Image: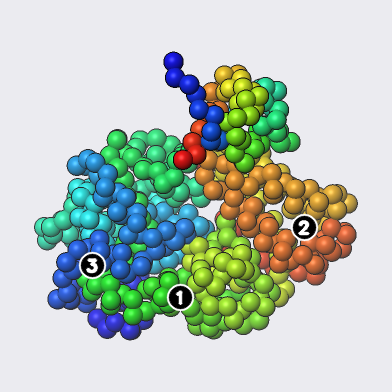
Amino acid sequence: MGVRRRTGVFYLRVNPILCDGFGHCHELAPELVNMDEWGYPIIEKEPTPLSNLAALESARYAVRGCPRQALRIERVSES
Amino acid sequence: MQAQALPRLLFGNPGTPLTLGQHEATFASSYRAASLLDELEASGLTGRGGAAFPTARKARLLRDQRGHNKVVVVNAMEGEPVSYKDSTLLGTNPHLVLDGAAILASIIGAKDVIICVSRDNPTAVGHVQRALDERQRVGARGPDFKLETAPWRYVAGEESALVHWLDDNESLPQYRPQRPSILKIRHHAVLLDNVETCANVGLIGRFGAAWFRTLGTAVSSGSLLVTVTGALERAKVLEILPGMTLRAILNVADADADPRALLLGGYGGSWLDAVHLDTPYDNESLTPLGASVGAGIIVVLGREGCGVVETQRVVKWMANESARQCGPCAFGLPALSDDLVELSTGSRASASAFTRLEHRCGVIDGRGACHHPDGVVRLVRSALRVFEQDFRSHARGAPCDGSRSQKYFVNVPKLEREHELIWE
């Protein structure tokens, strides 16, 4: 088991074609995902630092909770 | 062929394409490039399909891909309903386009070239078919050419949609999170370029980069094809120099010399107020004004027209042309269209529609898989900027004079029913 480095940032990304607007991501990660008037997610475009563990945790919940598997986490390591 | 003479791409007679023999005689040259890719790089050619991406950089990216069965796709779909430049070019010099495609194929090491023409444009299909038959008869060397006729939809000309269709699927845009992304047909990398770009590549291959650069500005080299429609007798396709002022272009096209505004770049483009008529027509000068050359479309809106109504008509059609894959586009564009309908009629609800419109533009922007919704948002935002006074009077419930004249300048096709849209 390696140690996860906590430097760098991550983005939560949605595949808009797969997304059907179930809205689970908004329930699971309200700090990262907003909802528009049609029920589709508006995801924070700014990167979130990986050191923000609470946000990372809820992003993971959102990824797992998506019935369409439309979400993923994109890590960008700072070098 | 002279370097500084202007009909370059449209040399000849629009409507009666040059035969292969005439073509070889017209574009005869003794120039031989040492490296075609370096030549392309030196020419500074940018893509003419709308995004103005450097062609050499794209070709280099594809050349560095692995595989022996790469494909060159020539995009002649001409998705913009008010653009005629691609079919005019194919009806004048189809062999120049094929030359360019063959050069691109030799640069990236492709064996196949596919020319995609919309099946709703039988004239252009015929021109390409005849040119291909001619080459077949002569036994011309080069890659294998193939003609494909895709269904005509606004988004079907988008590169990922077109390649997806060529890969035996529906012509729907695809989600591509990594950019630049490599498009593939049956796992073979694809280089996709617009017809006009290919024709320019053909010229560069024959005469070289130095010859090519004798026209145009330092940044936008070569000539440009533009379609001018709207307040003029009939639509015209012109070959112009980048850097010509808009006023001069309108003059050449014999259009209304005192318009209200211009729609530049196409249905996903932007409005430009007529006070900027003396701006040079190139991306360097237009970008600060929030406009761009785009697909080379200029729609002239006359004084008696209404920008609000014209925008509403375009957005309504664009909303119907959405592939309905992404929520923000499938639901957002009809919502924008409804707001604009409220505003254009100047009904009681129009004041609230006005405030809602700006908010919805911000919500929709950048949230589709392709740039279809972004283009519509750009159009609506530019309309809000250019026709601000008109929008305010519409929102007050007092539509401007232009909206009552029922005179339309932008040519919008008939709205098809949703279940009649053909995607494959």
Judging depth in this view, the residue of A66 and B164 nearest the camera is A66
Q: Which mark is residue B205?
A: 3
Please state which amino acid type lies under the numbered disc 1.
Pro
Is B327 located above or below residue B235 in the figure?
A: above
Residue at 53% from the left image edge and 80% from the top image edge = B245
Residue at 57% from the left image edge and 41% from the top image edge = B368
Nearest to N terminus: mark 3 or mark 1: 3
- Looking at the rendered structure, whether the residues under marks 1 and 2 are on a common chain is answered as yes
Nearest to N terminus: mark 1 or mark 2: 1
Nearest to N terminus: mark 2 or mark 3: 3
Judging from the image, what secondary structure is the residue with disc 3 in? helix
Which residue is labeled 1 in the image?
A: B242
Judging depth in this view, the residue of A11 and A25 nearest the camera is A11
Numbered disc in front, either 1 or 2: 1
Q: CA distance from mark 1 to mark 2?
A: 35 Å
Q: Position of residue B145 (x, y in %)?
A: 23, 51
Please state which amino acid type lies under the numbered disc 3.
Gly
Q: Position of residue B174 (x, y in %)?
A: 46, 39
Q: Position of residue A66 (x, y in %)?
A: 59, 22
Which residue is labeled 2 in the image?
A: B344
